[in-house]
Amino acid sequence: MRQWKLVLAGFVLIAAWPLLVHDVFYQRVGALVLLAAISASAWNLLGGYAGQVSVGHAVYFGTGAYAALVVYTEWGWPPIAGAPVGMLVSMAIGLVVGTPTFRLRGHYFSMATIAAAELARILASNWPLLGAAVGLMGPPRPRSLADLSFISPVPYHYLFLAVLTVLLALTAGMQRSRPGYYLAAIRGGDRAARSLGVPVLRYKLFALMLSAAFTALAGSLYAVMVGFIDPDSALGILISVKMLIVAALGGAGTLFGPLIGAIILVPLEETTNALFGGGGTGITFIIYGAIIVLVARFQPGGVAELWRSATARSPRRAA
Amino acid sequence: MLLEASNIIKTFGGFRAVDGASLTVNEGEIIGLIGPNGAGKSTFFNCLAGDAQPTEGTIHFLGRDVTRTSPEMHARLGVARTFQMPVTFEDMTVADNVMVGAFLRHPGRTAARRAAEEVLDFTGLAPLGATPARSLGTPGRKRLEIARALATEPRLLLLDEALAGLTPAEVRLAIELVRRIKARGITLVIVEHIMEVILSLAERAVVFHQGKVIASGTPRAVVDDPAVVAAYLGHHMRRVRRD
Amino acid sequence: MILLQVVVSGLLMGSVYALFSSGLTLIWGMMNVVNFAHGDFVMLAMYAAFFAFTLLHLGPAVFIPGAAALLFLLGVIVYLGLVRHIAKGPPLAQILGTFGLALVLRYAAFWAFTANFVSLPDNLVGGTFDIHGLRIEASRLLGGVIALLITLAMHLVLTRTALGSRLLAVAEDRNAAMLMGIRPDRMQAIAWGVGAASTGIAGALIALFFYISPTVGESLALIAFVVVCLGGFGSVPGALIAGLAIGVIEALSAYFIGAVYKDVLVYSLFLLVLWVRPQGLMGTT
């Protein structure tokens, strides 16, 4: 990796963050930035690298979140034990949504993701097992370390950092090897990719399932940290929008784009929430929507693309 | 016998694009598919490549039935193709484009890179390795498509109007490349409108008209065939651009 | 008897669905950009109708064509300012562009008009017809009939007029159309205008008998997607038949399994259509 010194410095800074700031508010922001980076990086696997734009990724996030709290409310397990369940169910959902639509033009897949997310939200709002409209709560008091119930945001910061590092390492490894090249080829053109022997459907599904699994993991982590979920906070359109705006603003299809997007957007959101109260959700969406339109219209490559033109090296993409 | 297509019929709705065409390709040959526009040769070509499925008829490659096999499988079996309108991967570099092809036979990155570099040298694209594909002109793109297809190490290479839109000088370079490809032991089936190319490259020419094969033989013989002349008199015969 | 009532009511609503879905299929057929904001266009038209009546005291005879004109303008502006550029960009930009627009429109309405439902007075197009025991509200009947006529008119314009054949030429093969002297850019702007105008009329009609709120756009957009997929991409007759079918299916499921789950049925039907017959009833590929 060319700019590894920069990456290393960034990593050290992020790791040291909770120790540098002592205010709980800023420590919490740090943890939330990392969680958003995980979701967005997971979305990026499918939307950025494979070029299949999901606008309903909340369905996987919500599955992970609900899986974590359902295993607690039904069987008393520590919520994190629900994460593998959430990941498996998410991958199955991905198969159902992706298999018919990946054979068609990209828009069909995107439309199907909206339908899937809405379906999930309606079902969750009406299914008693998932708490219906009221939602589910986690353990009110931690029963053991396994409950991962901490008062301070700091342990979460390091937990999320570990998960993000694994995800990004996996992505980087994939990028340089055959799957990465094949996904870039698929993004470049299905028909040409096929003529070179790329099993297009199989790789799209592979990207989708990997993306779904890690998004579900992010959802489970969210449920563990926040301790409460309901259909809107776990499956609402805001979740889907946040994931894709963080990834797209930072730079879809790049390794650190989602992290950059998270670093820009999450503190912004938390600060405006703190200053103006959470009731400005209408305005939040208007701003998010406007950012998405501007990125799409003027700079689809996001901040990463700006950085690349600014540093003006010879363009390197999939290698 | 490398490839055998028997009695291919392809209909779209009520229209018969290919109406009972057959073709035998022997190893080491260069075969030219020619014919006026709309004669069905492109559709036939797509059936050979696995991009279209014949409504009736069979295609066998190395004895194996590939009539309904996917394009991916075709590539794996050793049939590679280029496209009439080049579809290079614009966002990737020339070298990375070729690597996609190389990964078919070499799953590991280092081996794929080595194989890709060999192909880049062979096709003369090595100096352009780090250039993004989108900044190439048409001749560069066509050459890249050929290189990419070669990287899959095919037995049979199908070229779809790979020389259209090139200047006479570029055509000469392309012909030279095709000859070198043949020298490597790869069999070629090329679709072309430019008669000069067929005359200089193809050992055997197959003429399509209204979905059927109306003549087959050496290019010289076929060009003088009265049935062929009659078919072409109804259409323009394309000539190399006088640039 | 009640069943027949439900079916008729479904057909009437379905013809309104057919109207705005025809607009979507026209837009989508012309170029490779799906309008994710289509449902929110309908929502804007609904509010336009509402304010035309409550603030300007204009009746339906004025605000229905008015909404059409307003949305036509919006469609053209959206095309020129946004769509034309994202169409040249990567697929990500194409999808995000109209999706972002949908969010902006929806939540601008949310912020400006609040989440509270509003509605036009019941007696605006008043009365209920009783035909052999079938009770049909005049507003719904008017809506359904007008929608049907306009959809048919759209089909006729596309297939029988010079403008229509120019539009179809661009949809078929942009480069060939250019060679024939047709200006694709202008045609696509018109297509977006017409597509948006269809949402204008549909929204104004729906406003006559439905609650108006900022978030109706999301479910209407999904209905439009289902109708377009079922009817075949680019086919107005297909959208008509599929729209009517979806209207009836929706009405029947609301009757048998309740209003909440009717959405579940429609979305599941969508996924099912994608699995089984993505080319739709009348489409080819």
Image (cartoon, helix red, strand yellow):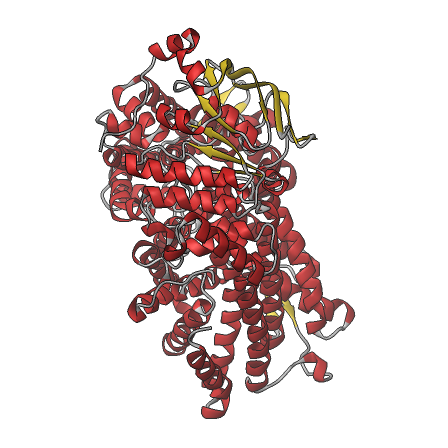
In the figure, residue B6 lies in which quadrant?
top right
Q: Position of residue C103 (x, y in %)?
A: 39, 55
Quadrant where the N terminus of chain C is found in the figure: top right
In the rendered view, would you say C234 is above or below C87?
Answer: above
Task: State the residue at coordinates (42%, 72%).
Answer: A260
Q: Quadrant of residue C255?
A: top right
Q: Is residue C43 left or right of residue A49?
A: left
Residue closest to the far right: A75
Residue at 46 percent of width and 41 percent of height: B180
Give the camera-side residue of A160 and C126. A160
Say above or below: C168 vs B104. above
Q: In the figure, is residue A111 to the left or right of A276?
A: right
Query: Picture coordinates of residue A25 (x, y %)?
Result: 46, 85
- Residue C119, image x, y percentages: 39, 45
Relative to the observer, which residue lies in front, B106 or A31? B106
Question: Number of numbered discs present?
Answer: 0
Asked if one can make out residue C8 in the rendered structure from this viewpoint, the answer is yes
Position of residue A128 relative to residue A100, above or below, is below
Given residues A155 and A199, the one toward you in this image is A199
Q: Residue at x 31, y 32 (%)?
A: C174
